[in-house]
Image: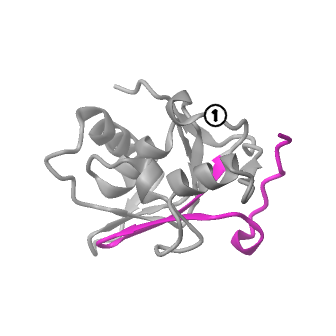
Amino acid sequence: MKAVPFVEDPQRLQVWMLTAGMAAAEAVLVHPPRTKGGGQQIMVLKGSMLQEEEKDSCSRSVANIRARLISFGKLKDRRDGTLYLNEHIVFASPSQAANVVHGESKNGWLFWRLGSHHGPSLDEVTEMERRGETELIYYEKPEGVIEIPSRFS
């Protein structure tokens, strides 16, 4: 599958949504396509709102990612219970991205939804694509975008 050039206009993208509490994030899948256990990269788009509070299930690795993004000025505290992402960030997997957005442990394949918080999950759409019912779109990673590795400490 060929990568599609990334454009800054969300209306021209196949956007995945994740909402919970005060969090409202948008993301796109990053080329190349990978299997569920193979580390499918996902890019959370600038302007996304992340839950400020970290729950008990938030791993030390995820807490460190959040702290590092804040210290580098990539996440800004809005003082309303959310953190604002001021640039695109590529995560090593949908679950890593969901965990950072939520501030707790989440299965990203179930929590990222196509188009809206009522849309089908990434897991459901992946299965639909396998059956030939739809097509997932994978975007080229823009130059200079920060990538969070799968093993982050």
| Colouring used for the render | one colour
Residue at the image point whose x is 42% and y is 24% from the top: 151
**The C terminus, quarter of image:** top left
Asked if the stretch drawn in magenta spans residue 59, the answer is no
Q: Nearer the viewer, residue 19 or 127?
A: 127
Q: Residue furthest front?
A: 131
Horizontal and vertical percent for residue 150?
A: 46, 28
Residue at the image point whose x is 59% and y is 50% from the top: 127
Residue at the image point whose x is 55% and y is 28% from the top: 38
Horizontal and vertical percent for residue 5?
A: 84, 51
Would you name the residue on which mark 1 appears?
34
Horizontal and vertical percent for residue 87?
A: 58, 55
Horizontal and vertical percent for residue 123?
A: 51, 51
With 37 as the anchor, is 54 left or right in this view? Answer: left
With 78 as the anchor, is 30 left or right in this view? Answer: right
Q: Nearer the viewer, residue 130 or 7?
A: 130
Magenta range: 1-29
Q: Is residue 70 visible?
A: no
